[in-house]
Image (tube, helix red, strand yellow):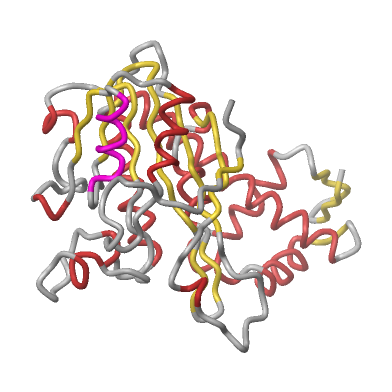
Amino acid sequence: MTTSILSYPERGKWGKSSYRGNCSGYIYQALFDQYKPKSFCDPFVGSGTSLEVALEMNIKAFGLDLHQGFNALKHSIRDTIGQEVDMCHSHPAYGPMVRYSKDVWGNGIGHPDDLSECIDDDDFHEKLHLVLMNQREATRAGGHYGILIGDLRSAGRYVSYQAEAISRMPANELVSVAIKTQHNTVSGRNTYSNMKHFSIAHEYLILWQKPKAPVSLLIDLSEMAHQQAKRLQGVWKTIVAHAMISLGGKASLNSLYQKIAEAAPDKLKANENWQAKVRQILQISPKFNSVERGIWALA
């Protein structure tokens, strides 16, 4: 049985070793051995590593890519291949480290729907979410869909692409997260004299399982919207509770407003009615009690 730590220093005979960002074919061998799909699709097939492994293991396989004319942001995977599959898994581009349509297979001009050409992190998160929903649609009921993706550190910021992807997809469908160690990377061969933090030498292999019972798209979207709303509500509860702790566990509304304005300015920019949100949290959450008019305390 394969564990949740995957480490394969050799990439194997599959695909093209010259293709930047190529994943070891042994990763796909382990993935297929564990889940035993009879059909598979990779909508970011790159140089064909996953496709070659699948075909070698007698798995009916489909490989699509932007360099072939398939656009995962605009074209349905299911309609393009003409069926649903047992597994729809991809290794998408992430971050600007390797600009595929510009430098790998393109003509020096980046394609606007290439995930390595996103204008910022929010643009990437939204596009990857759309890709995952496309993969999910192409997966049969009870089948698996997922991604292999890493994180990015750039200009002093750490961006966790995997955490954002997990938070946006249905929580009850997540079934596995494995850590894949990276070998023979360009960044790994470089020395950074001012490096203050651990260098990133891993990716995440993430899998979700589509429900066995058919669910309408409207219900799917409603559940995801509810999940995000609940998450946002939880963030506001934490902000208010932290402000209350900073004020000694008991405070007036005006003191809370002032403390929150100091501690969470980004949240206030996103919600001009934030003071009403604070009052709502105080009134509906069992974390807080009204001890007298205009005065609240931690429960």
Q: Residue drawn 49% across and 76% down?
A: 154
Q: Quadrant of the C terminus?
A: top right
- Note whether 137 is above or below 150 in the view shown: above
Q: Is residue 32 left or right of residue 172?
A: left
- x, y percentage for residue 111? 15, 65
Determine the image quadrant of residue 260.
Answer: bottom right
Q: Residue drawn 55% across and 68% down?
A: 158
| View extreme (bottom): residue | 193
Magenta span: predominant SS is helix
Instruction: Please report the bounds of the magenta region as a residue range.
Output: 48-57
Q: Is residue 32 left or right of residue 198?
A: left
- x, y percentage for residue 31? 44, 32
| View extreme (right): residue | 248
Determine the image quadrant of residue 87.
Answer: top left
| View extreme (front): residue | 13
- x, y percentage for residue 153? 52, 71
Is residue 175 highlighted in magenta? no
Q: Is residue 203 left or right of residue 133?
A: right
Q: Quadrant of the N terminus?
A: top right
